[in-house]
Structure formats: C-alpha cells, structure tokens
Image (cartoon, coloured by chain):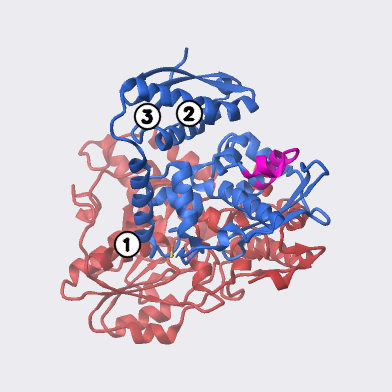
Chain colours: A blue, B red
C-alpha cells in the first residue's frame, strides 16, 4: 500500500472542482487510457485576466486524482503568467509530498496546465513536440530533459518515477541515461570553475532570496541561510515550513536542485535547527 | 471495524483451531525434533503427524512431502532440482501467466543460458495446448505450469499436460498454491512429479510450505545443510508452522465441499450482481474452468487503485491488476497475456473469498461498489452521463 499523506487522501476522497468549465479560455487533455492515467483541465479567466474557475476530470489512481484536484485549487485566483510558473514539485508540495513512484502524477498535472495555457495563448501544446524516447509511454526527449533538470534527477529509476518513461519494456533505458548525462553535464558547464568562497556564499544568498523565499513565503514559511561549509549549505526553516514535517524532504530537494543549477553542482543542502 | 476480507488469494486468516494447535509448540514444547531426548522426540512425532495430514489432502504418501518455508521456495527447489538431475538438458517450458516465483526464476535461468518457452494464453486465460505439445523437445528438462491462476482463478489442464510430458520422459512440476484445498487433488492417480503448496493460502500461517516429490523422482536439494527432511531440505524444522499446516490441510479436506458450494455461491452472487448493477464491466478469465472462490472483474474507464482505496474506506479488502498496484507501470502480466484491452485492464479488481465470508458481507459489497464506480466514472474524462465517450478512446 502506498504511503499517502492525509492531504492526498483528503483530495482523493473529496476532490475539488470536478467537471468541465463551460466555454473555457484554456483547455487540454494529457495522458491516455493506455498509460493508465489521463487528465482534462479547463479554466476560465475574468476581465482582469485571473483564473476564476478551473475544473478537472481524471482517469487514474488516487494520487492522480489528488494532484489534479490540488492543481485546480492552486491556480484559482492566479494570472496565467503566475500559473505558468507552477512546477510539478509545487503540486507535490501542496499535497505534503507524494511517494517517489507517484511523482509522475504531479508531472501530469503540470503538463496539463502548460498545455491548457498554450491552448489559451493559441500555441501548440508543448508536450506534443519533440522526439519520442519512450515508445511504451510516449514520452519525449524534451520532457525527460526537463524533469531531470527541474527535479535534479540522477537515475533512470527516478526518471521513470517522474515520467513513467522506462517503466515498460525497458528498451529506452540507454537513451534515458544519455539524456541524464547530457543534462547533468550541461549543468556543470555553466559554472565558472573559479568561485571563491565569498562569491559562492553570495550567490547562494542571492539565489535563495530570488528563487526560493518568495514561494515559501506565499505559504507562510521562510528559509534562512545559516552557514556554508565547503559544499554543505546549512539552512534553517521558519514559520509554516518549520512545523510541517512532510515538507522537509521536498524542501531540501527543491532548494538543493535550484542551488545546484544556479550556483554549484556539488552543493548539498542540510537542514539545521536554529 | 472488522474488515470484509475478499483478498484470500493474497493470504488468508489463520483458522482459529490452527492457531490453538500451534501455540503449545511456541510455548512449552520447544524441543528440536532431531534431538535424542523424549522432550524433542515428542515434537518429532507431531511433525510426522503433520506430514501425514498434508499428504492426506493431496492423496500422496507422507515420505513424498518435504516441508519448506513457502511456495516460492518449493517452486525454486523443484525447478532447480530438475535441472540439476538432468544436466544434459537445457530447456524449460512454463507459461506466460505464472506467479513471479516461477516467472522470475525462468528469466534468471535464461540469463544462465537455459532456453525458456512460455506458453501463451487466449483471451479467456486458457493455455494454448497446441503450442504446448509443440514446445516439448528431447532437450526439455522440466515443465512447470501452475494448477490454477492466482489472478483469474482459471484452472489449467495440468493432468493432461503432465501425461504428455511423462510420455516424453520430461519432469512435470505444478505450482498448486491456489488450487490445494479448493479443488480435489489426487497424486496417487497423477502424472505430476512435483507439486508446490503454501500454508498461508489455506488458513495456516505465512512462512511455511511444502513440496511434493513423487517417490522415485531424482532429486537434488536446494538448501544444503543438516539431515532434516531426510537430507532433502536442510534447516531446523519450523515446528509450530508445520503443525499448523498439517491441521490446516486436514480442515481443508473436510471443508472442500463447502468451498465448492457455499463459497462458490457467494462468489457467483457477488459476480452476477455486480455485472447486473454496473454498466460496462466484465469478468476476466474462463468462467467455467475456475476456482470456486475467485472473481476478476474489470470496470471500464476507472483505475483499479482508486477503486481499492475507495473500498478501503468501507474496510473492504480486494486487489487489482492495474498498473498502479502491480508495482510496475503496466497492468498485470496475466491480463496483458490475455490481451485484455487497456480500458479494462487498468480497472480490474480481484475478489477472492474464503469460507469465513458471510452473505451479509457480500451484500455490503454489492451495495457499496456500484456507487464507487459511478462516482469515479463521474471524474473520468472518458465517461459522460452513463456511458463512455468512445470517440476519444484510443
Ligand atoms: S520504450 Fe520506454 S519502456 Fe518501453
């Protein structure tokens, strides 16, 4: 049995915003019956360009239903630009985390949201482009590269957890490994090799201020940089984050992924209580 | 709340009288059956009694029973033994719908250089017998075919298959963990050489099983150790569980009729009512050649895990062959081998009953499940007011 958080269970048993918006401004369906889950998302904007209504229909397991329900709750009241910034990790965080093997449910939510926004903007759906790497689940190269980048994935197994790619016949494993290697290689290249300790700390501070704290503060939480020892980044959580045990793991993953991407690929985030 | 337990092909409750019978051997009679003293010797006598009880259920001789730790160990022992005693032969025949205990072992043996043939099944889950006949070669060391399938309950013609194997001098093993205790088995009048059974599928505890090996069959042990089980399986006997397995087998023999009348009646009632009340669902597997306790039903356009977790709210326990519950990302290998369409495979639920179920429990499920399906279908993008949107279904 999966270890679902109470919030996942609650959204699964009492899903919010089920159905379809009439005359939607944005609409999209992603996934398929063959793959075992699918999500249809529709939303409507008010005059000010904010999402006034969002509804979903899902075929899938408990966490797929909960992720879709969470997504509609999250985007209501946002502008399209704000909604476009939502990542799969945000969806998982909203639910207090998802089992690793179920992260693909949050990715499906993000995909549906992007496709619906693309539909609204009159652009082609992003997931429809690109070369298919995993035939079993119809996952493209771009999609895999993206989850690897955004979630700091390292292994084929993780890619499977997040996209399903590789979870069938296994014929695509080599290709997935190549994408992982390429993306992780890229991440390293961006970094200028000489980075003094002072520079490093400064960049970490800036990144936390710019990229991480705003999202946390939205949920009534905060994060403070305590110290940097070598590649160990010591941080402390504040406010809502500090009391929410379920969020700690995902918080560490998110912060670490961002810092590794933008500052230094070998950084390790550690949480200290101070 | 007491659960409504309809997952007996996964595991069963320990029969109360079985539990009582084993407890003294965890408390006061802790002697080693191999010991010379009376204290241990009396335990040895009980183990002998259990061996007779197990043999009795399948009409075998007590010496033909080897106690093991589980069905998986029995399967591994049987197949490895056949290969070890037929060193010149490099071919194994099995089926596509075996339990992982055999299927994964087959995959491992393929890596070790053996040739493995997996017999396919048809849409009803029945084996392709023409393919089977053709698969047997002079190089074949062993055939391993389950007696009844754990997911669909479909019963395979193992006697007929074993006779064909014997004619060609090939050993035949059957994984009978789902069949033992549910349908009559008579090893005295059989061509089967080896048979696996498992305690926890017939109201004994987990962690005990047995392997039947026909007298005169060449045999090579899997666990090498002491002289226990006449040197055929090393390791000190799991005495309390062996005693439990013995009594459970005796009780199963007594209750076999009930299994095929009362349990079958409950299963049929559950199945017929659900088919009648829920649109677009169907039974997976041959309904005539089937274990009396098993029903595998697919509900189209809903996902199995979601059904199970909604049932869980009512403390109703079942299992599913959907991707999300199979531990992989694809639906069960059995349903895929049968060619069950994806629309159906993801929404498959297996109910497996036992003599401990009541009609009232079955009625509760009949009252509860249709609403759950309707509710989940209302969430499904492939469903609109009472029927599927077929145009969108690939
Ligand atoms: S092609 Fe990716 S798992 Fe089959």
Assess mark 3: CB under 8 A from ligand 1? no
Q: CA distance from mark 3 to mark 1?
A: 41 Å
Q: Is residue B92 left or right of residue B332?
A: left
Is residue B258 found inside the magenta-colored segment of the image? Answer: no
- At x 72%, y 39%, the residue is A78
Whether residue A72 is in magenta: the answer is: yes
Question: Horizontal and vertical percent for residue A27?
Answer: 72, 56
C-alpha gap between disc 3 and disc 2 = 15 Å
Q: Which residues are magenta?
A: A68-84
Distance from disc 1 to disc 2, alpha carbons, whole Å, reads 51 Å
Residue A207 is labelled as 2
Name the residue located 56 percent from the left edge and 44 percent from the top edge.
A88
Per the image, the residue denoted by label 3 is: A268
The location of residue A190, given as percent across then percent down, is: 36, 41
Position of B312 with respect to B64 (left or right) is: right
Is A95 left, or right, of B149 in this rendering?
Answer: right
Mark 1 vs mark 2: in front: 2
Q: Main secondary structure of the magenta part?
A: helix
């Amino acid at each position: 049995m999966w270890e679902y958080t109470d919030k996942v269970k609650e959204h699964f048993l009492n899903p919010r915003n089920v159905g379809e918006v009439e005359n939607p401004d944005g609409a999209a369906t992603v996934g398929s019956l063959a793959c075992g889950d699918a999500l249809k998302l529709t939303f409507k904007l008010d005059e000010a360009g904010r999402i006034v209504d969002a509804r979903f229909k899902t075929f899938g397991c408990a966490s797929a239903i909960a992720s879709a329900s969470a997504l509609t709750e999250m985007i209501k009241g946002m502008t399209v630009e704000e909604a476009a910034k939502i990542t799969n990790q945000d969806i998982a965080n909203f639910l207090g985390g998802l089992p690793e093997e179920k992260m693909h449910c949050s990715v499906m939510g993000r995909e549906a949201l992007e496709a619906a926004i693309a539909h609204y903007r009159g652009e082609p759906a992003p997931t429809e482009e690109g070369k298919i790497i995993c035939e079993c689940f119809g996952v493209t190269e771009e999609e895999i590269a993206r989850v690897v980048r955004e979630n700091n994935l390292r292994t084929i197994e993780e890619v499977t957890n997040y996209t399903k790619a590789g979870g069938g016949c296994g014929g695509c494993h080599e290709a997935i490994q190549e994408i992982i290697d390429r993306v992780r290689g890229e991440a390293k290249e961006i970094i200028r090799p000489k980075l003094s300790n002072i520079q490093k700390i400064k960049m970490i501070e800036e990144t936390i201020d710019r990229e991480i704290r705003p999202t946390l503060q939205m949920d009534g939480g905060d994060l403070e940089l305590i110290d940097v020892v070598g590649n160990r980044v010591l941080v402390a959580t504040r406010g809502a984050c500090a009391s929410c045990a379920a969020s700690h793991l995902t918080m560490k993953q998110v912060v670490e992924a961002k810092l590794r991407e933008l500052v230094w690929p070998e950084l390790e985030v550690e949480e200290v209580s101070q | 709340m007491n659960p409504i337990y309809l997952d007996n092909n996964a595991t069963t409750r320990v029969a109360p009288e079985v539990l009582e019978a084993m407890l003294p051997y965890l408390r006061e009679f802790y002697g080693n059956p191999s010991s010379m003293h009376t204290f241990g010797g009396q335990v040895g006598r009980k183990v002998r009694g259990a061996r007779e009880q197990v043999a009795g259920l399948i009409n075998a001789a007590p010496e033909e029973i080897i106690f093991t730790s589980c069905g998986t160990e029995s399967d591994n022992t049987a197949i490895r033994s056949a290969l070890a005693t037929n060193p010149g032969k490099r071919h194994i025949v099995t089926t596509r719908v075996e339990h992982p205990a055999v299927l994964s072992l087959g995959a491992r043996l393929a890596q070790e250089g053996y040739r493995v043939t997996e017999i396919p099944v048809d849409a009803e889950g029945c084996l392709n017998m023409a393919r089977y006949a053709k698969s047997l070669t002079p190089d074949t060391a062993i055939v391993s075919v389950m007696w009844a399938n754990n997911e669909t309950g479909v019963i395979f013609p193992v006697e007929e298959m074993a006779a064909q194997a014997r004619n060609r001098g090939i050993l035949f093993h059957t994984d009978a963990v789902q069949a033992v205790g549910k349908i009559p088995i008579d090893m005295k009048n059989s061509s089967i050489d080896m048979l696996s059974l498992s305690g926890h599928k017939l109201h004994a505890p987990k962690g005990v099983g047995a392997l039947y090996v026909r007298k005169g069959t060449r045999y090579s042990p899997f666990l090498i150790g002491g002289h226990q089980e006449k040197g055929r399986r090393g390791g000190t006997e799991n005495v309390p569980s062996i005693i439990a397995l013995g009594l459970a087998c005796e009780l199963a023999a007594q209750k076999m009729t009930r299994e095929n009348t009362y349990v079958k009646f409950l299963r049929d009632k559950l199945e017929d009512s659900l088919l009648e009340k829920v649109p677009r669902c169907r039974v997976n597997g041959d309904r005539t050649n089937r274990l009396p306790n098993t029903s595998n039903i697919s509900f189209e356009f809903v996902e199995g895990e979601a059904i199970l977790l909604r049932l869980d709210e009512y403390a109703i326990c079942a299992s599913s062959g959907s991707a999300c519950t199979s531990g992989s990302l694809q639906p069960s290998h059995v349903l895929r081998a049968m060619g069950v369409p994806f629309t159906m495979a993801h929404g498959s639920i297996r109910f497996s009953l036992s003599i401990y179920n009541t009609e009232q429990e079955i009625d509760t499920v009949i009252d509860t499940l249709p609403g759950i399906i309707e509710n989940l279908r209302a969430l499904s993008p492939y469903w609109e007011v009472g029927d599927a949107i077929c145009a969108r279904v690939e």
